[in-house]
Image (cartoon, rainbow, N blue to C red):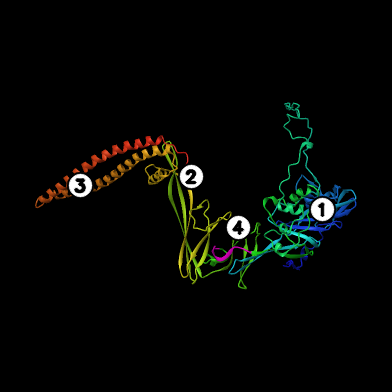
Amino acid sequence: MRPIAPVLLLAALAACAHGPSVSSEQLPLRRVVVYRNGVGYFERSGTVSGDRIEFKVRPSAIGDFLATLAVVERGGSSVRAASFPIRSEDKVTQGGGAGEPKSKAGGALETVVLELDGKRHDLSVGYVTEQPLWRPSYRLVLGKDAPVLQAWGIVQNVSGEDWNDVSLSLVAGAPIAFQSTLGTPVIPRRPVVSDTGELISAVPRSETTLAQGAKASRGPPPAAAMAPPPPAPAPMMEKSMRSRPSKKEAAMDFMAAEAMGAEAPEPGLDDDAGGVSMPRDMALLANMAVESGATRYDLPNRVSVPKESATMVLLLAQPVPGEAIHLFAPDGGVPDSSRHPFRVARFKNPTKGLLEKGPIAVFEAGSFLGQGVLEPLAAGGEATVPFALERGIAVDQDRKAETRDARLARIEAGRLTLERDQVQKTTYRLRNGGEAAVKVVVRHPRAQGMKLHKPPEGTEEQVGKGTALVPANVGGRATAELVVEERRPYQTGADWLSPEADEAVKGYLADPRADAKVAGPLAKAWEIRKALVAAQREQQKLQGEREILSTAAEEAREGLRAISRNTKGVEELRQRLAGRLGELEEKLARLAKRLVELELQTNEQRVSLQDSLQAIKLAEPLPAT
């Protein structure tokens, strides 16, 4: 299969036109690495005859050039020094602040000279300067089989010089890079000491230390005795600089280069260096985030990118696990999305690298379906990208908050603390107006501080985004319900006689993990509590009956008082009311006696319960299952 050439975008970038930030007639440009944070790593290499090499550097780039300059000499000689001019006093920064040179970006170029030891040199020089970030662009083609994902990278060359036949690499992620002002002289402010003849009223105490032998010294060892640390395993970027990689290493499994049969990239700084250790440091200078898992795209073919133009290179072309489904994710910019789901493409990243954020176009059966934006997708991660709105499906939602469950949290000095759950229950009702069954994924906004409780099968939590993707299936012309429950535990004090306490204690006693030293005394105390609760319930029942009987007795008395004014024809009624009143008073007397007994009984049981609970101590709740 023939290699696919990069797509060259001949768009003029005249607005950014200027001379090269760094150039050298003695060393041609061999390698360019573009990052996503506004910098690029440039590497020049070749054979030089003479005792010096000159670089033309724009004044605004001198600081970055000096801060990241790394040189490897493979010819047996070495670099003596690097010198550069200081142009005028107006560049001096007072006070140690982050001052900037006053010369403009378009000013005269400065000359930086590398003084060499010897006459013939095989040099590689690497440095970092400002560079527009590279941007990804994706294509996803849906079909009966697995979707096919293409990833392209767009690179703009505004460096001011042509990139002719260079090894081009794109790095996903943003390593730490900052502007440096090493080319700007800095004179720090010094304290001013004046002699005004002040009287020193107290003599400061001096400090001395005793001489120590070398073995007893706790200070740092002499420089000559400090051996360098053993070399760490070379990261991916460093590996590409140290030796000429194979086709498989250069292409990486997430690039299309291996399938294209491409050549290996240009050798790196330490290619065949014979034990030179500088390339390891160079890797760190070129990409300080390389050891943090930054993904690097090494193009298999050398590339030429004329100045003030852009190029589009293929990074990935392979089938990916995925499907087209529906996603309910209300978006303020799309008002109808509060009622209808989006049609989305869902696929996994099967590569070992990061797919950066970028636009993605979706196609199916030769037709353009829509566009979306792919957020950064880590290796093995799954993306859900909306590209159209589906009005044939409607979604309603309802939220309710309540408190549930009770667990023993702490028992100390007879005081009870329970652990309860604050619950938020969200119900989604999905109605499908089409004939075919559909799969709908709901992007559920997570309640702050809460955790999903028994989420539906297939639920995915989007870490760092405060949402969860919850799937549901809806038949044709049918309605389905999706319930998402979230819980947050909290601790609260409780009365031993409350229903919540009874639920918590019974749950603890039924748990096989319960501490026997706590469960035994607690079970005995709970028998007392059971009798106390029964007595209190009887007490409440009898008190209710007493109120009813007292009301009836008062009505009988009122009737007797009313008929006492009439003496004719009411004797029979008077006798009946008197008999009724007597029965009620007898019952009230019995109730009063029983209530007194219950009052004594509950008082004794309450004291006994409190005494038995005083000896029980539970420091923390059982772990959640």
Nearer to us in this view, 485 or 101 = 485
Asked if the residue under mark 2 is in contact with the one under mark 4, i.e. CB atoms within 8 Å, the reply is no
Q: Label 4 crowding class (10 Å Cα cut-off): few <14, some 14-19, many 20+?
A: some
Secondary structure beneath disc 2? loop
Query: Which amino acid lies under the numbered mark 2 shown in the image of this protein?
Result: Pro
> What residue does disc 3 label?
553
Disc marking residue 623: 2
> What residue does disc 4 label?
381
Sequence-first tag of 4 and 2: 4
> What residue does disc 1 label?
124
Image quadrant where residue 510 sits = top left
Query: Which amino acid lies under the numbered mark 4 shown in the image of this protein?
Result: Gly
The segment highlighted magenta reads: 319-330
Sequence-first tag of 3 and 2: 3
Q: What is the C-alpha distance between the residues marked 3 and 4?
A: 79 Å
Q: Nearer the viewer, mark 3 or mark 2?
A: 2
Q: Residue furthest bottom?
A: 366
Image quadrant where residue 109 sits = bottom right
Percent x, y for residue 560? Answer: 16, 48
Q: Quadrant of the N terminus?
A: bottom right
Asked if the residue under mark 4 is in contact with the one under mark 3, i.e. CB atoms within 8 Å, the reply is no
Percent x, y for residue 269? Answer: 79, 53
Sequence-first tag of 4 and 1: 1
Position of 253 with respect to 332 (left or right) is right
Asked if the residue under mark 3 is in contact with the one under mark 1, i.e. CB atoms within 8 Å, the reply is no
Identify the residue at horizontal 50%, vertical 70% (top origin): 436
Identify the residue at horizontal 73%, vertical 58% (top origin): 250
Image quadrant where residue 251 sits = bottom right
Position of 155 with respect to 59 (left or right) is left
Percent x, y for residue 598? Answer: 28, 39
Instruction: Tell me, yes or no, if residue 333 can be seen here.
Output: no
